[in-house]
Amino acid sequence: MSDRDLIIDRYKDLLKTYLKGKSETALYKGQQFSRKLIEQQISPDDVLSDHVSVLHELFPDMSEELKDSFDFLLEVMIGYGFAYREHQSLRTRQRQLESEIEVAASMQQTLLMSDVPTVDGLDIGVKSVPAKKMNGDYFNFVKDHKSVSIAVADIIGKGIPAALCMSMIKYAMDSLPEQRMQPNLLLENLNRVVEQNVHPNMFITMLYGLYDTDLHEFYYAGAGHEPGFFYRASEDRFEDMFAKGLVLGVSRQTRYKEYQLRVNLGDMIILLSDGVTECRTSKGFIERDEIVDLIRAHMHKPAQEVVESVFNELERLQEFELRDDFTLIILKRKV
């Protein structure tokens, strides 16, 4: 007799014992016995089939209607068994996928991690938080003896493909050190890389800038990226940092324009992704003026505290559920 036959015989004995005495002990033994059924991979419909056969043995005079009802229940449970096994298979595959995503997210964080540099005369604050496990935003700093470059980008597309695409962008930038000093040329080279290597339904927006720490000039170019803000301390005024340019990957022949800002004491450069300006609350999308008001309310603080405060407030307005990746960078010129 096979193990399965022994298990079924044991189940029949337990059922008969319960039907005769209906004791709590018999019920408990039935509950415990369910583990054996799972271990032997005996499906619910098989258990029900054997359950019906026991009832036929114990109650041979059952009415035909009652017997027919058990036949109906058995067919239902057979369908349930198939659906249950399919569900369990899908759950197993989902757990495997989630595990793979965890590994990929960890690798992405390691590969794309960028240390915030310490720069004389600049106070820098950065906050970048993914809405999901994989981050579709990217930022990067590169510092040398007389300048610091800043890139902030956003993939139009999410998940693992976006993360892989962002990794490619990072290493493409690392391979173009000679263009780093000219933002428009760097974007033109990146655009050719993206157009040649990235699927046509994925695009990348980017703003790339170079801060000259000797002259305190900021040179930048944009590829369809969300405009940042520039705060002029002398006028106590925020203005939009528009940088016109087509998103990366659309046309190989795209050319980009370089812009320039003079940065005086107290001035601030604010770079961001659309996860900041397209924050959606119960009342709709938040306005850019509201972002400015939040920054203004905290700009007396160090730059890192400013970005943390803005993030905390926008997270609260979204009921602590980010709907898009969030990246906010502030560079404040100090004495």
Image (spheres, helix red, strand yellow):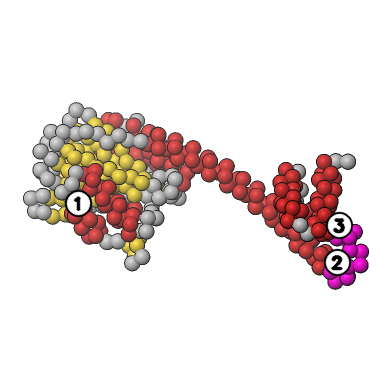
Disc 2 marks which amino acid?
Answer: Lys
Of circles 2 and 1, which is in front?
2
Tag 3 residue: 54
Check disc 3 and report its element: helix, strand or loop: helix
Tag 2 residue: 67
Disc 1 marks which amino acid?
Answer: His
Whether the magenta-drawn stretch holds residue 255 is answered as no
Question: Which of the 4 image quadrants contains residue 128?
Answer: top left
- Cα separation, mark 2 vs mark 1, equals 75 Å
Check disc 1 and report its element: helix, strand or loop: helix
Question: Residue, x 29% and y 41% (percent of image)?
Answer: 151
- Cα separation, mark 1 vs mark 3, equals 75 Å
Percent from the top left, x then y, of residue 88? 65, 49
Image side of residue 283 versus residue 240, left or right: right
Of circles 1 and 3, which is in front?
3
Q: Which residues are magenta?
A: 54-66
